[in-house]
Image: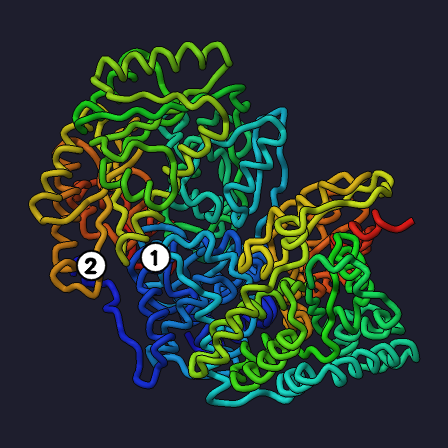
Amino acid sequence: MTSSMIGEIINAIGKDKVLTEKEELACYSYDCSTYKHEPELVVLAHSTADIVAVMKTAHKGKVPVVPRGSATNLCGATVPLKGGIVLDILSMNKIIEIDRENLTVTCQPGVITADLQNAVEKEGLFFPPDPQAMNMSTIGGNVAQDAGGPRGVKYGVMHNYVLGLETVLADGSVLRTGGKTTKDVSGYNLTQILVGSEGALGIFTEVTLKLIPKPEAKRTLVCAFDNLHDASRTVTKIIDHKIVPSMLELLDKTSVNLIQSYVDSGYPTDAAGVLLIEVDGSPSEVDKQIILVSELCKECNAREIKVAQTTEEADAIWVGRRSGFAALSAYKPTVVAEDAVVPRDRLPEMVAKIQEIADKYGMLLPTFGHAGDGNVHPHICFDPRDEKETAKVPFIKDEIYHAALSLGGSISGEHGIGIAKKHLVPLQHSELNLGIMRGIKAVFDPDNILNPGKAI
Amino acid sequence: MTAVEKMEKLANVKSGVTPELEKLYHDTDNCVRCGRCTAVCPTYKATRKEMMSARGRVHLARKYLEGSLGVSKTFKLYNDLCLGCGACLEVCPPKIKTDELVGLIKQDIFGKQGHSLDEMMMLKSCSYPQSFRWIVKMIDLNKQLGLVHLLPPELKAKANMFPPAPDKTLRDLVKGVELTRGGGRTKVGYYPGCLTQSLYPDVGMAVVEVLINHGYDVVIPPETVCCGLPHKEGGEHSEHRRLAGKNIEFFASQGVDYIVTNCGTCTHALKEYGHIFTHDPAMADKAGEFAAKTRDIMDFLTEVAGLKAGPRSLGGIKVTYHDSCHLSRRLGVVKQPRKLLAALPGLTFEEMPKANWCCGAAGSYSFKHPATARQILEQKMANVAATGAQVVTAGCPSCLMQLDYGKREFGVDCLVKHPVQLLADTFYN
């Protein structure tokens, strides 16, 4: 970037929204992945107009721009790999409208996900997607990464809730797509093309999301198994009985032990596998479901079943799950959360495969995840100062995804591609698929200035 | 190139880094940049800048200790802008002590560059109680004469943070009080601290009255000095030890059974005395004994004295409580103030949202960084206002001063008091 470009941006949006000191640039070089690269400029955008101004200058000078929310993604999506500008949207954090009649919420992209959830829940409404970083992550970031979480099994992920977007494109033009309607079949669905685009197609400046009424009641149970196979086949058994739990999480023994030593969540530490199950709905429905789920767990040889009797007990159980990544990072300096998804019925095979890979490389691969939708997170925990351990990491990673693909799955359920899995994309997608994706990218961003070097 | 090959190789500390800093540096190897700290860091919430989060501060510290960042004005500023409140440590998965890390880096910088004129004046004035009192009086005089209006806006804001200086200090007020009328059960030494002495003598008097009402003889050594925490944090370790030594001697000569304070920061500092005389075993023993006797007044009343409130009802007032960082996080005094308040007749307690978020006072922080401190205070006052309480209480005069300023600055209609003042009110007729 030239100093005249920086001057142009400062003139357009004001000096206090621009960071140029080397200490400041250093702090925008990373996210929750293992990659780092410093930008040449950081812009703290306060409005759509700020972003338009930045994009006009960037477009003219062909300067890379990486939009950034809370930088909690796990794949390097917000690392400015080619330098240029980091465009921070955290100050655009207003909830514009909660529309109780249309069941929608419209907000700016920098709203913290949990803040939005709390705000709509006060109105008796519910925004289900629950990425585990929701206390820190932004709605804009979650849309860009098409984030999901445990509730995905019943309620789906971000893309199931995005109805409308305002997006600033690479040349500074402002695109509005979708709106408040739940039905809309006019033309191609541009909104959904933008969801999960990892900042490579445009920068969101306003998001309209679908809401649902808040379920009246919910109940949680924890059950322990003596082998992982029984735990994972319980998952399909429950679904086969026409029950879709609101959360259905599987934890292996290593994860359970690491979580328990981090925060006491009441998990049995000697079990080979633990399922955490929540059902929700009307109070009577929920009571019926929890009994049926307990019976099905028993049929699959569950050794111990504990139904939470109070909200506090239930909360403690879920706090443990949410602390999963944190607990592992307390165990080894570097934790890479892998994110494979397979069709639900292939889950037992995938879990077995991960175990085989762990044994083969002689490393623990603590695994937990949203078993209910076939999405598992084996975690590669290692010490980057240990060369031997570090050398194994790329091999373990690739084997996990080869396994997922051979079972008809995908290399990412909800974390995205970013830098971390770019090399694996051609294994999943044919040249035909990739050609179409490249074509779309070229229409939106012909000069390749938006988050270059990532995803495809 | 595979993804892992793009990972940055870990560096190491440059030569000349102290062993304490080297250890903390290696602890930061475990920072996965998960961002949990961003959800609880008051400076980050106020500014939304990455350098103002623990995650950012850890990154800067690493680069400084590795040698790729030097001491610049910006580097110094961002370190100085850490409140040291310790909120990040509570949520940090690998338990990285960012507050300690930043504290040591600040000392490292002082060691290299010395103190600025402001910092030096602050430390000097803290060393001598008379000069601290003099500054308070001068600010007050200027306000009364309307001279502060002539000051540049930043200095004017600083002057306005001070509450009106009372006519008499605690030492003046306590002169006519019969301190041994408690019945002589046990001798309790009272360490009032600089802010209570000069600005909140009423809090000090409440402490004295309450102790006497609980049947204790109260001893206030005539010449206690600053607890030394500002000097420790400023890297002035020998001055820190000098002040500590004086306080230890003053109380030792009085033969007290306990030492109480009404300031979370002072209590924390006094309790640390046990660790600072590493090269002087005789002094270390005395200091250890001193530290073991020291308690916060609310902790002392509820856990040792067997709290008893007076008969007078407070008339149905609604009260909330703000946790001082030193009291709650360093000393674990969290339940005690709530227990104390709940025991008072005619008082309804209302918990405020985020009661343990720093108010922005943080020692001299609010004076050094008024703009950031004001943003932090704004959030705090909104949480106070949300309770609808008529009285907001806190167990640290530095917080009281900040809350009092916040109340005036943001127009929140409430009184600001130490919980012990409310307890004392139940004894008065």
Taking B327 as reference, is A56 left or right?
A: left
Q: Quadrant of the N terminus of chain A?
A: bottom left
Residue under mark 2: which chain is it in?
B
Question: Please, is residue A240 above or below residue B402 in the view?
Answer: above
Crowd tier of the residue under label 1, counting other residues whose Cα lies within 10 Å: few below 14, some 14–19, many 20 or above: many
Residue closer to the observer: B424 or A159: B424
* Mark 2: secondary structure: helix
Question: Please, is residue B226 above or below residue B343 in the view?
Answer: below
Q: Answer with mark 2 or mark 1, whichever residue precedes in sequence.
A: 2
Question: Please, is residue B392 above or below residue B76 in the view?
Answer: above
Q: Residue at x 75, y 57 (%)?
A: B211
Taking A143 as reference, is A334 left or right?
A: left
Percent position of residue A270, x then y: 23, 33
Query: What's the amino acid at mark 1?
Result: Val
Q: Which mark is residue B4?
A: 2
Taking A375 as reference, is A92 left or right?
A: right
Q: Which mark is residue B32?
A: 1
Crowd tier of the residue under label 2, counting other residues whose Cα lies within 10 Å: few below 14, some 14–19, many 20 or above: some
Q: Is residue B418 visible?
A: yes
Q: Is residue B78 visible?
A: no
Percent position of residue B382, x then y: 71, 50
Question: Please, is residue A456 above or below residue B281 in the view?
Answer: above
**Of the two numbered discs 2 and 1 in the rendering, the one whose residue sits closer to the viewer:** 1
Question: Within the image, what quadrant is residue A159 found in?
Answer: top left
Residue closer to the observer: B51 or B395: B395
Question: Within the image, what quadrant is residue A149 found in?
Answer: top left
Percent position of residue A326, x then y: 36, 48
